[in-house]
Amino acid sequence: MDLNEQGRTGTPVQTRHFWELARADFLMRLLRRRIGGGEGTLLDFGCGDGYLLRRMAAELPRWRFRAVDAAFDAGTMRELETAAPGRIRAERALDAAILPEVSCVTLFDVLEHLEDDAGFLKMLAGGLPRGAVLLITVPAGSRLYGEHDRRLRHFRRYDRADLEAVLERSGLEVLECRSFFCSLYPVRLLELARGSAGGGIGGGAISPGWLNALLHRLFYCEAVLEGVPAACGLHLPGLSLEAVCRISVS
């Protein structure tokens, strides 16, 4: 979650919005599938309030983490570093000198905040070692861009072809790229048609709690199952896109 949406790292799971919880479960599944059996240094760039970073540290015990977010304050950095002593280092700015030692980079809902997304990706591609993996999510659907995006300081939303193009132009090998949360796409279209700015997730869990928990599980299952048609070449529009890339080993 962006720090401009939610300001504390220690927010309990029970008070987090079902969308955020489903997204985190989906991304942890993706991480386990791609790097779960390995070890090394993971750069989590733009890690927001650190909820997902804490989960990564707990579920990927052989990995070390460099956490970077320009919005960090001293208290947030201290909380994150004490969550996994000796394994997490939190910083407000990226030191490009660390890139040769990084095996994996996570850019979860980051690129849309960067005016020069291609320039940033090229910088990463030029500094990371061969075989390094990048896991990326972005808001999907250029036609869905609206007031909610402007409020969150998004420069753009991405169509799948456009995301793949910018990744490939930056020198990255795209291993997979697909939408998730497809059921929310028509909901967002309807909001735009009605002139609604759309809701963020900063308000926390919906009430009652059992409904938030149920929707959490349903949307997680949806995100996982959406991989089936994508694997068959059927790419449905969704609210988000995920991509897995690597620095070419050839």
Image: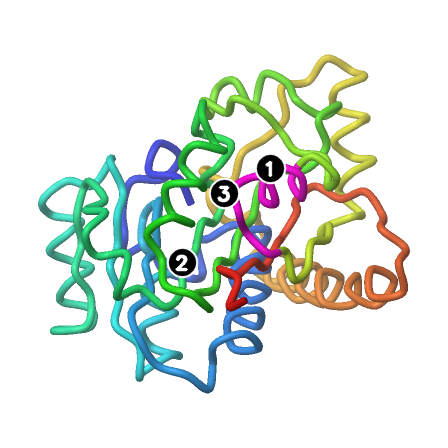
Q: Are marks 3 and 1 in contact (CB under 8 Å)?
A: no
Front tag of 2 and 3: 2
Front tag of 1 and 2: 1
Query: Amino acid under label 1?
Result: Val
State the extent of the magenta-drawn residues as a range: 163-173
Rendered location of residue 245, percent (x, y): 56, 58
Which residue is disc 1 drawn over? 166
Query: Amino acid under label 3?
Result: Asp
Report the predominant secondary structure element of the magenta stretch.
helix
- Is residue 168 shown in magenta? yes
**On screen, residue 82 above or below 149:** below
> Which element carries disc 2, helix, strand or loop?
strand
Q: Nearer the viewer, residue 213 or 39?
A: 39
Q: CA distance from mark 2 to mark 3?
A: 13 Å
- Residue sitting at 71 percent across and 60 percent down? 223
Tell me if 27 is positioned left or right of 161 in this view: left
Name which of mark 3 and mark 1 comes first in the sequence.
3
Q: Are marks 1 and 2 in contact (CB under 8 Å)?
A: no
Which residue is disc 3 drawn over? 109
Rendered location of residue 74, percent (x, y): 9, 44
Tell me if 198 is positioned left or right of 105 in this view: right
Query: Amino acid under label 2?
Result: Val
Rendered location of residue 129, percent (x, y): 36, 63
> Which element carries disc 3, helix, strand or loop?
loop
- Residue sitting at 35 percent across and 44 percent down? 46
Tell me if 135 is positioned left or right of 177 in this view: left
**For residue 105, which numbered disc appears in the image?**
2
**On screen, residue 75 above or below 117:** below
Q: How is the image coloured?
A: rainbow
Q: CA distance from mark 3 to mark 1?
A: 15 Å
Task: Determine which quarter of the picture holds residue 193.
Answer: top right
